[in-house]
Amino acid sequence: MKKIGIIGAGHVGLVTGACLAKLGNKVICCDNDLEKIKKLKNLQIHFYEPGLEEIVKECVKKKLLFFTESIYQIVKDTEIIFIAVGTPPTEEGKLDLSYVENVTVEIAKSLTKIKSKNPKKKIYRLIVEKSTVPVLTSEWVKKTLELLTPTGIEFDIAANPEFLREGNAVNDFFHPDRIVIGVESKRAKKIFEEIYKPIKCPKIFTDIRSAELIKHASNSFLALKISYINAISNICEKVGADVEVVAEGMGLDKRIGKDFLKAGIGYGGSCLPKDIAAFISLSEEIGYPFNLLKEVQNINQQQRLLVIKKAKELLWNLKNKNIGIFGLSFKPNTDDIREAPSIDIIKLLKKEEAILKCHDFKAIENMKKLFPDLFYSENPYEVAKESHLLIFLTEWDDYKKIDFKKIKELMKMPYIIDGRNFLNNKILNKIGFVYRGIGRKNE
Ligand code: UGA
C-alpha cells in the first residue's frame, strides 16, 4: 500500500485518486474549491462519470480515500504527489499553467514545514505531473522546487500523462492500452512499477520530456483522424458515396484502425480542442509551425456549420421554425458541455431566430447556465412535439430506444439531421422521415 496525494479533484484527479484507492492504496484528494471538498466528504460527486460514485463510496468506507483542502496535509502525509489541477486555455490558445505553478510553490512551502519522524531517514517525495501540460513544464516544476525546497529533503519529478476518456474513465483506468511514465531516477521508476503492478498493460518508461510529448502527440493524432474522416465525409457527399462504408473499409486495415473514424459534427470537450491549440502554439514558439494541425482545427470548425446548411436545405428559412435539439453534452455518458459542438450550433440557430427546444440525458443543468432562455425537457416526446426538425448532436445510446413512429406523429414536419451518424437511416426513412446524416447518401 502506498500513500498517495492527488492535488486537484476534477475529472482527472478524482478518477485517478479513487481508482488508485480501489487498488488498495491510501489516497488523499485535495482541492482548493471548498464547496467541492465539502460535497465529496458527503459522498457527492460534482460531475457525472459512470462507475465513479460506487468506487468513491466503497473506498471512503474502507478508509482508503480521504478529502482535504490542505496541500500541507498532502505533503505531510503522502509520499507520492500527483498534480492534477486544471490547465485552462488562454485567449491565445496556450495553456494557463499558473495553477500548476501555484501548487508547486505550495508543495515547496509545505516541505519546509514538515519534519522526518525518523531523523536518520531523509524525507523523500515524488512529484508527478498528471495534468496535460506542454513539454518542458516539468523543468519549471523542478526548478521551482529546487529553489524553494530546503536542503535535506529529497525529491523526484515525474510525468505520468493520463489517457482517460470522459464517460469511460474508470474502465480506461483499469484497462488502459498503455501507461506512460517519464522518470529521472531508478527510485521513481520502482515506485511506479509497484503502483501500477495490478494493471496489466504495456508500461512505457521514458524521459520526462518524451512522456509529456506523447500526450500532446496522441491527442493531436486523434483529432487529426477525426478531421481526416470529416474531410472524407465532405467528399462523400459531393460524389454520392457513404462515409460510413468508406470508414469501415479503411478501418479494417490494421495500420489505420477503425477507432476515431466516426464522421460527424467534429470533436469537442475539454481536452482535444484545448490540447491541439496549445500544441500549435508551442510548435510556433519553438520554431516549427505545425500547419497540419491548423487545418485539423479548421475542418473541425467547418463541420459544425454543416448542420445549419443542412437545416436550411430542408426548411428553407429557419426563422420561427421549431427545432428540437437532441444531445447537448460533447459526447455521450457525460454531463460535460465544454467546447461541445451543441454550443456553437445553438448560437448559430439562435442567430437565425429558430425556436429551440433541447433534450439531453445528463447535461441540461449545465446548458441552462449558458442559455437560460431556451426551453428544456427531459421528455424527448415533449421536445419533438410541433417540431419542424430534430437535430441529433450527441450519440446517446438511449436515443435509439425512442419510439420514432410516435415522434413522427408529434412533429409538424418529418425532418431529422443526425450529426453523429448513429441512427438507423433505413428504419427512419421507412417510418417516413427525411433523414440527413453527415457524408451519407440521401435516400
Ligand atoms: C480525449 C482522449 O481520447 C483521451 O485519451 C485523453 O485522456 C483526454 O482527451 C484528455 O486529454 O484528457 P475525451 O476528450 O474525454 O478524451 O473524449 P474522446 O472520446 O476523445 O472524444 C473527443 C471528441 O471527439 C468528442 O466530441 C467525440 O464526439 C469526438 N469524436 C471522437 C468524433 O467526432 N469522432 C470519433 O471517431 C471519435
Image (spheres, helix red, strand yellow):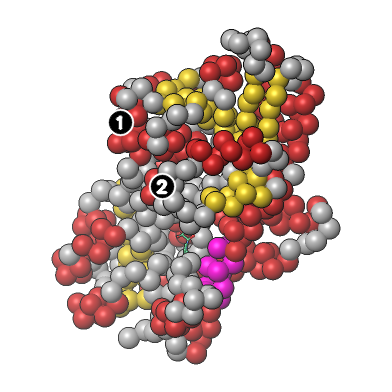
Residue 64, by quadrant, is top left
Queried whether the magenta region covers residue 226, the answer comes back as yes
Q: Position of residue 32 (x, y in %)?
A: 54, 23
Q: Is residue 423 above or below residue 165?
A: below
Quick one: label 1 or label 2, which is nearer the N terminus? 1
> What amino acid type should be assigned to the residue bearing mark 1?
Glu
**Which residue lies at the image location 21% right of the left edge and 81% below the top edge?**
430
Crowding at dot 1, Cα within 10 Å, few <14 / some 14-19 / many 20+, comes out as: some
**Which residue lies at the image location 47% right of the left edge and 54% below the top edge?**
201
Q: Position of residue 282 (x, y in %)?
A: 75, 52
Residue 426, by quadrant, is bottom left
Residue 58 is labelled as: 1
Q: Is residue 81 visible?
A: yes
Q: Is residue 383 left or right of residue 355?
A: left
Residue 377 is labelled as: none
> What amino acid type should be assigned to the residue bearing mark 2?
Phe
User: Closer to the camera, 433 or 235?
Assistant: 235
Residue with the mark numbered 2: 174
* Circle 1: element type: helix
- The magenta segment: 222-231
Q: Main secondary structure of the magenta part?
A: helix
Q: Position of residue 272 (x, y in %)?
A: 56, 55
Queried whether the magenta region covers residue 400, the answer comes back as no
Q: Which quadrant is the N terminus positioned in? A: top left
Q: Is residue 323 visible?
A: no
* Label 2 residue near ligand 1, CB within 8 Å: no
User: Closer to the camera, 59 or 7?
Assistant: 59
Looking at the image, how many numbered discs can be counted on the residues? 2
Q: Is residue 267 above or below residue 423?
A: above
